Image (cartoon, rainbow, N blue to C red):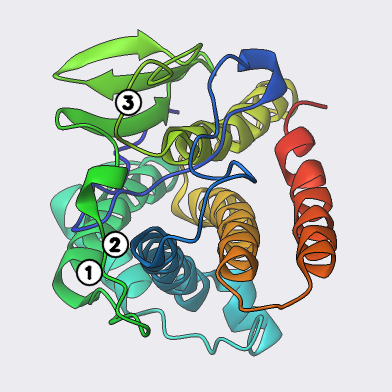
Amino acid sequence: MTRPRIARTALALLLWLLPAYASANANCMESDNQCDPDKLCTFKAALAEKVFIYQAYLRNSQKTRRWGGREGIKYDGKLYDASIAEAKDAFPNASAEDQLVKAGQIFQEKIRKYAEDNFKTPTCQGGGMVKLSLFPKAGYTGAYTNDRCQVWFKYNGGEYSAQGFGSTDMTPCQEFYDRDLAHEMIHKASCEAAKTSGKNLDRIDNMIEDEIAAYRHSVWLTKAYVRLLSIRCSKLPNRDELKKRVQRIEDLLSPYLMKAGN
């Protein structure tokens, strides 16, 4: 079920590390870190990009069309319809099933181009700026799940085990490698389930729903990270209350981090 993932735009498309692969340090979320407006801005920008792509999938989901809307998003379907039409034109002799698979591949490329052309990095308030050095190192191009339901990280044209990847990097936030892996672990779980049920995840409809599930989790997790950083940057005069709020957000993060490990 290997699919072309959306390439990194100005921001990386990222996720979290699971207990099964634990060895990395979440160095940008350590509770003793002082408030860093640039760090908060960087995570807010990453969240904005996740939401942008997530909503693009929702707009083209056939479930959204059937339900008349989904999570506040109305069906658009322009990319979906264009992908179906292009697959039929390009592969007129293919079976209907194969055309749907081809349409899925075309759709992923259209989503990638749509994100590159339309996503704009938001401006942060409070003097914060996106700090590119917090993102994964040069040469890293994301993670993917292959047809055997194995997850790999791509770096300088090679494939690397997810275990401990990036844990020795001193500059980027480990959370960004972690979130990439978590995204793929959701794909890995659906891949393994599909092998049992015979479901073809490469069909455009199934592929879109699979991506929606992974991106939904990405959005939830990144929101929690932003909330945690925002609290650390708040001007609460009571340090004990600040610690309590931080603990509540860290408790909120726990089920997200454990979810795909179950």
Residue 131 lies in quadrant: bottom left
Q: Which residue is mark 2?
A: 111
How far from the left and from the top, in percent, is residue 117? 14, 72
The residues bearing labels 1 and 2 have C-alpha atoms spaced at a distance of 5 Å
How far from the left and from the top, in percent, is residue 6? 29, 49
**Which mark is first along the chain, 2 or 3?**
2
Task: Provide the secondary structure element on which disc 1 rests.
Answer: helix
Q: Are marks 1 and 2 in contact (CB under 8 Å)?
A: yes
Q: Looking at the picture, which amino acid does disc 3 mark? A: Met
Q: Is residue 133 left or right of residue 18?
A: left
**Which mark is first along the chain, 3 or 1?**
1
Residue 128 lies in quadrant: bottom left
How far from the left and from the top, in percent, is residue 137? 22, 32
- Kindly identify the residue that appears in the image at 40 percent across and 50 percent down: 100
Question: Dot 2: few (<14), some (14–19), or many (≥20) neighbours within 10 Å?
Answer: some
How far from the left and from the top, in percent, is residue 107? 31, 57
Q: Which residue is mark 1?
A: 114
> Of circles 1 and 3, which is in front?
3
Q: Which residue is mark 3?
A: 170
- Kindly identify the residue that appears in the image at 15 percent across and 18 percent down: 157
Task: Provide the secondary structure element on which disc 3 rests.
Answer: loop
Q: Residue 2: in sight, yes or no?
A: no
Q: Residue 139: in sight, yes or no?
A: yes
